[in-house]
Amino acid sequence: MALAKSTLQVVRRKDHDKQDYIQAIDDTLGDIERMEKLSNQLLELTRLENLNAQPEMNRIELSPCLEKLVSDFKQISVRQNKPVVFTPFRGGTHKGTRRAA
């Protein structure tokens, strides 16, 4: 929600051309779709917990999701003239985490 709110606040702050407004609307709609998906997943998790069901555990790839978030924040940072630096973590172990066997 914060990303959608920030996008709309930046667009509201001053006049933009039509393409900027279209991009802001598209970005916000994408954020809303992700929030809707997350809400549905939380509802499903609640239903499973109420049934004492055991969810199926799957390995997921977080990189695409995180890269999308970084891209979104970079676009906002450019509009606000505030730099964002993303340093991806590749392989190995990170302090406080363990690698799966």
Image (spheres, rainbow, N blue to C red):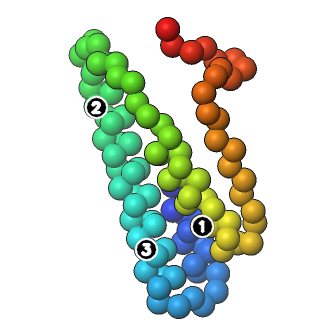
Closer-to-camera residue (29/57): 57
Q: Residue 72: image x %, image y %?
A: 55, 60
Residue at the image point whose x is 51% and y is 82% from the top: 20
The residue carrying pointer 1 sits among few (fewer than 14), some (14 to 19) or many (20 or more) residues within 10 Å by Cα, namely some
- Going from N to C along the chain, the mark reached first, 1 or 3, is 3
Q: Nearer the viewer, residue 2 or 74?
A: 74
Q: Is residue 40 left or right of residue 71?
A: left
Label 1, secondary structure: give it: helix
Residue 31, how many percent across, how many down? 44, 58
Q: Amino acid at mark 2?
A: Glu
Residue 45: quadrant of the picture? top left
User: Helix or strand or loop: what does disc 3 sit on?
Assistant: helix
Give the image location of residue 17, x and y in percent.
53, 91
Bin the neighbour count of mark 2 within 10 Å (Cα to Cα): few under 14, some 14-19, many 20 and up.
Answer: few
Q: Amino acid at mark 3?
A: Ile
> Residue 50, can we see it?
no
User: Which residue lies most toward the right here?
Assistant: 82
The residue tagged 2 is 44
Q: Which mark is residue 25?
A: 3
- Give the distance between the C-alpha atoms of the residues marked 2 and 3, in whole angstroms: 28 Å
Instruction: Report how far apart the C-alphas of labels 1 and 2 lie in the structure.
Output: 32 Å
Q: Is residue 1 visible?
A: yes
Q: Are marks 1 and 2 in contact (CB under 8 Å)?
A: no
x 68%, y 23%: residue: 94
Q: Which residue is labeled 1 in the image?
A: 75
